[in-house]
Structures are given as structure tokens and as C-alpha cells.
């Protein structure tokens, strides 16, 4: 099973490239699903078919789907939302305002990811191609599983213990309804589902492809995107430079060729050693499965776009002479934009305003951070064992 997620700045041809890659896979005999989590709903337009909430075959071996997150929202969030509504209404808040307050932030993105996970796990497909939303929305989408899983793992066990032990007393004392078992089960189910999303998206057979056009603003955003994806633990395996002007023609076009040549050199320098595929500007917009498949074949130029490349070493922990070192790959990051904080058993890492909370493994929880340095696109964090904690928990020193 191969899973490819396509993203890029709005307007760079992300949907066309995703659809083309899927069309090429199907023509090569791979049973392929291409689905969109982008609210723009343009995937069907690119394929020149109707895209519905369920996978529909639009060509031999090629299925298309526009994810309907609302249906999943009702199924997975309904019990929890009903409980929150009852609490707010008991507190005197009118129902309309209560409903507004109980809408799960990022709900559409979360349940779109659950659909991706289910399709990957179904075993029906050889290739799953995901047409993601533009870069900002994609980053929010891909950061959600780990962030929500962290909160649920911290809060949920406490909530369940309190409710079980104190339900009779608390219900009378505070005058508010306490969650029923179905609510706790729904929270537990959501927690487990998010863990499943992480497992699928961070598998070695899953990777992200960045689509860009050779323009300075677009390339700058793609560089930031690469850093942010690495921060959240996602693997980028290729960059696709779209709408490249071919040489030859009048002075106006040659001016664009020269400008793009400069940006393509910047792309090569920035994203090496990632493969960079160039898609020439087409005489006509590629629409429909045959045109898209030809577009993909020209873009990948004989390479295998579905091969699984060696996994990138984005996060690792090694033993050192004095303790341990955790290293985090942050390609293209600027050391001035990196902030690191230890909070209890977690490490909070921020890069250019993007934050990731990482639960430390057991050995590092019993250590203190002794220093950090950024070199060769990696943040290296040194940990020294806390002798008190090691002796208390293990009865021995490391």
C-alpha cells in the first residue's frame, strides 16, 4: 500500500498533479483511490467526473472520492456534543449559543483524516492519493492528530476516574449532569481513532509531495512547509515544479524563462537531495483521465512515482558518554526561529510559530536537558540522567 499526500500553495496545480499521479497509477495496473480533503471540491473537475462521498470508479482501476466530513462528525462527536449541550443548557445558556460552543475546532479536518485512515486500512487499494488543502490548512490538518491525542491522553484518564468514583456526590453537589458511559466511550473511541490516524500518516509507505511553481513567493512558502512537515514528523519524498516555461519564443516568454531558471536553481539548492520533477507549462489545461495520465508520465519522466524511498531520520535518540541525545530533523530551519521548552514529561518545540508537544520516552523523562545545538539541519538536545529520579524509579543508576 502506497499513500501519497499532495499539498502546495493555492493555485499552483496541486489538485491537477494529485489527479494526474492517480491516473498514471491506474493506467499502470494499480487499483487506485484519489480523494480530496480540500473544501474547494475541484478534484472532480480535474478528472471531469462527479466526485461523491463514497469511492466511485471513474476509469479502469481508478476511483474518486470527495470526503464528507460532516457524516463522520455526527457519528463520532454526537454523544460528546450532546453531553456538552446539556451542561451548557443547565448553566442557563440558550441552545443556539450552546451549539456554537460545542462545535469541535478543526472538526472537518479531523474527520477527513479518519476517512483517509479507513480507506488505507480497508485493503482495497494499491495506491491512495490524497489531494490536501493548500499549505496552511494542510499543516493544521496534519498537526491535529498528535495534538488532540496528547490532550485526550492527558485529560481522559483523569475524567474517567473522577466520574466513576464521584458520580453520585458530584451530580447532586454541582447540579450539572455528569457524562454517561456512552460519552466516555465516545471520547475513548476518538482517542483510539486519532492514534490510528498517526500510525497511517507516519508510516514508511506514506509521504508528502510538495507542488510549487518557480516563483519566489511560492518557493519561500514551500521551504517553510518542508520545515514544518519535518517538525510534525511527516516525510516529504519529492518536489514537483509545475508550469515551467519551455525555452524559445518572444522576449516576453524568454523573460519568464530566465526568471524561472533562477528560481529552479533556488529550488534545487533548497530541497536537495529530494528529487525535483518539472512539469512544463501545457498548451491546454489537462482535464480528464487520459490527459492527466500523459501529464504525469511527462512530469515523472521515467522514474517510478510509487516506489518507497528510504525513510528519513526525522527523530532519533542515541546513547552518549554523558547520557542521551535526541535529534530532530528540521530542514531549512533558521536557528533564530527555534524555541525549546521542557514541561514535565513533555518537550515543547516551536519553529517559526509552529509548535509541537512531544511526549518524552521513559528514559528521557528521568533526565534533565543539559543543552541544545542546531547544526546540519538538525536540532540536537542533550539529556543528562537525574540520579535521584533514576534511583527512585529503578532502584539503580543508569
Image (cartoon, rainbow, N blue to C red):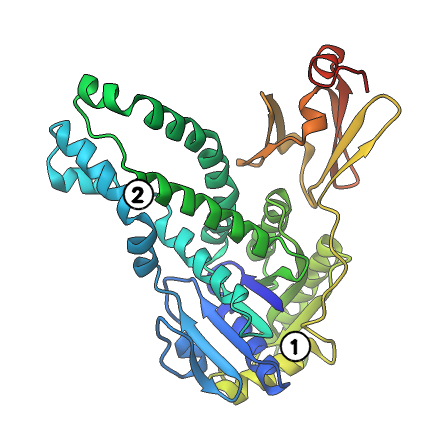
User: SS for tag 2?
Assistant: helix
Residue 188 lies in quadrant: top left
> Farthest top residue?
388
Crowdedness of circle 2 by 10 Å Cα count: few (<14), some, many (20+)? few
Where the C terminus falls, by quadrant?
top right
> Farthest right residue?
321
Q: How many badges with numbers are in the image?
A: 2
Q: CA distance from mark 2 to mark 1?
A: 51 Å
- Left or right of 121, for residue 362: right
The residue wearing badge 1 is 299
Where the N terminus falls, by quadrant?
bottom right
Question: Reading the chain from its start, which is encountered first: label 2 or label 1?
Answer: 2
Is 168 located above or below residue 149 in the figure?
Answer: above
Residue 182 marker: 2
Question: Residue at (62%, 53%) from the top-left corner?
Answer: 202
Is 187 located above or below residue 75 in the figure?
Answer: above
User: Percent position (x, y) of residue 232?
Assistant: 59, 44
User: Percent position (x, y) of residue 295?
Assistant: 59, 82
- Left or right of 221, for residue 235: right
User: Percent position (x, y) of residue 310?
Assistant: 77, 59
Q: Are marks 2 and 1 in contact (CB under 8 Å)?
A: no
Viewer-proximal residue, 175 or 326?
A: 175
Q: Is residue 16 visible?
A: no
Residue 217 lies in quadrant: bottom right
Q: Is residue 87 visible?
A: yes
User: SS for tag 1?
Assistant: helix
Question: Residue at (68%, 28%) from the top-left corner?
Answer: 362
User: Percent position (x, y) of residue 212?
Assistant: 58, 63
Amino acid at each position: 500500500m502506497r499513500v501519497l499526500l499532495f499539498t502546495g500553495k493555492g493555485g499552483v496545480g496541486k489538485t491537477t498533479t494529485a489527479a494526474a499521479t492517480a491516473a498514471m497509477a491506474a493506467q499502470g495496473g494499480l487499483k487506485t483511490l484519489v480523494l480530496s480533503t480540500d473544501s474547494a471540491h475541484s478534484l472532480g473537475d480535474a478528472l471531469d467526473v462527479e466526485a461523491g462521498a463514497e469511492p466511485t470508479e471513474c476509469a479502469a482501476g481508478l476511483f474518486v472520492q470527495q470526503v464528507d466530513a460532516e457524516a463522520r462528525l455526527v457519528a463520532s462527536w454526537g454523544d460528546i456534543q450532546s453531553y456538552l449541550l446539556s451542561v451548557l443548557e443547565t448553566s442557563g445558556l440558550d441552545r443556539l449559543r450552546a451549539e456554537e460552543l460545542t462545535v469541535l475546532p478543526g472538526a472537518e479536518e479531523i474527520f477527513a483524516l479518519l476517512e483517509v485512515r479507513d480507506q488505507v486500512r480497508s485493503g482495497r487499494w494499491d495506491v491512495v492519493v490524497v489531494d490536501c488543502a493548500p499549505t496552511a490548512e494542510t499543516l493544521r490538518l496534519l498537526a491535529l492528530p498528535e495534538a488532540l491525542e496528547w490532550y485526550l491522553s492527558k485529560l481522559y484518564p483523569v475524567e474517567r476516574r473522577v466520574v466513576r468514583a464521584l458520580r453520585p456526590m458530584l451530580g447532586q453537589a454541582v447540579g450539572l449532569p455528569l457524562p454517561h458511559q456512552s460519552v466516555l466511550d465516545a471520547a475513548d473511541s476518538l482517542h483510539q481513532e486519532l492514534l490510528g490516524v498517526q500510525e497511517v500518516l507516519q508510516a514508511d509507505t506514506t509521504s508528502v509531495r510538495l507542488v510549487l511553481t518557480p516563483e519566489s513567493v511560492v518557493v519561500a512558502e514551500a521551504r517553510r512547509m518542508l520545515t514544518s512537515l519535518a517538525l510534525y514528523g511527516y516525510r516529504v519524498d519529492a518536489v514537483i515544479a509545475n508550469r515551467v516555461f519551455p525555452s524559445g519564443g518572444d522576449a516576453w516568454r524568454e523573460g519568464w524563462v530566465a526568471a524561472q531558471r533562477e528560481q529552479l536553481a533556488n529550488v534545487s539548492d533548497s530541497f536537495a537531495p529530494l528529487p525535483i520533477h518539472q512539469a512544463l507549462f501545457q498548451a491546454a489545461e489537462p482535464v480528464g483521465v487520459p490527459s492527466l495520465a500523459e501529464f504525469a508520465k511527462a512530469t515523472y519522466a521515467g522514474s517510478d512515482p510509487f516506489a518507497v524511498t528510504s525513510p528519513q531520520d526525522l527523530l532519533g535518540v542515541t546513547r552518549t558518554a554523558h547520557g542521551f541525545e535526541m535529534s530532530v530533523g528540521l530542514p531549512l530551519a533558521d536557528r533564530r526561529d527555534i524555541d525549546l521548552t521542557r514541561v514535565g514529561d513533555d518537550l515543547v518545540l516551536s519553529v517559526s510559530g509552529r509548535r509541537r508537544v512531544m511526549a518524552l520516552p521513559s528514559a528521557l523523562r528521568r533526565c534533565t536537558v543539559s543543552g541544545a545545538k542546531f547544526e546540519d539541519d538538525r536540532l540536537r538536545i542533550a539529556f543528562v540522567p537525574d540520579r535521584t529520579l533514576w534511583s527512585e524509579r529503578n532502584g539503580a543508576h543508569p
